[in-house]
Image (tube, grey):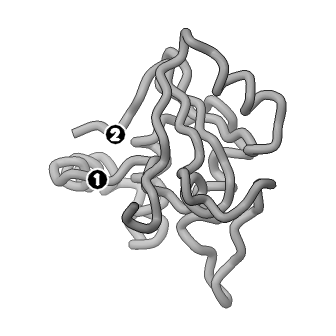
Amino acid sequence: MSTNYFDTFIEIAEDCPVNIAEVPPAKGKSKSVALLQYEMISQNPYKYSQDDVLFEIYAQRNGIASKDKATEREKFFAKGQACLRASSLTKRYGWGVHNNAEGKVALYPVESTEYLNFVDNPEVKHLKAMRSKKA
């Protein structure tokens, strides 16, 4: 089951604690999922879909060999997966995610003009990131 959106902007969560986007920190010697997502998307805007990002990071963290990726990707998406609305990027670190017409993603910091332009654009579907705490 795909997590991809098309012509959609994921706004930060209502309870996001920052007004200026932050780069997620590393956790000790390893990179957090949020940092891996940030690096993959910010270094390659509109190159990958949400599915690509979610699976590639899962594959990296689980040591999945290139030759096994197609089979493992099928298994991975056979179960429901949380989309980037549940990512710490959108919930905690202040990054909006734009999904273009092809379903490819790019990040926009909450304080940027581009972020505000997406928020004000009626031609783009709008979703909020999931809250960290219950209302």
- Choose between 88 and 50: the one closer to the eye: 88
Position in image of residue 109 (x %, y %): 75, 44
Identity of the residue drawn at 75% across and 62% down? 23
| Closer to us: 21 or 71 | 21
Q: Secondary structure at mark 1?
A: loop
Which percent across, then down, holds residue 6? Answer: 44, 22
Mark 2 → mark 1, Cα distance in angstroms: 7 Å
Say few, some or many: other residues with alpha carbon within 10 Å of mark 1 (under 14 / 14 to 19 / 20 or more). Answer: some
Q: Are marks 2 and 1 in contact (CB under 8 Å)?
A: yes
Residue at the spot of label 2: 3
Q: Nearer the viewer, residue 85 or 75?
A: 85
Inspect the image, locate mark 1, and give the three-letter code of the amino acid beneath it. Gln
Q: Residue at x 29, y 50 (%)?
A: 73
Vertical placement of residue 24 versus 97, above or below = below
- Of label 2 and label 1, which has the lower sequence position? 2
Which residue in the structure is indicated by mark 1?
81
- Image coords of residue 48 (percent x, y): 54, 36
- What amino acid type is highlighted by mark number 2? Thr
Q: Residue at x 28, y 53 (%)?
A: 81
Seen as rendered, the residue at the extreme top is 123
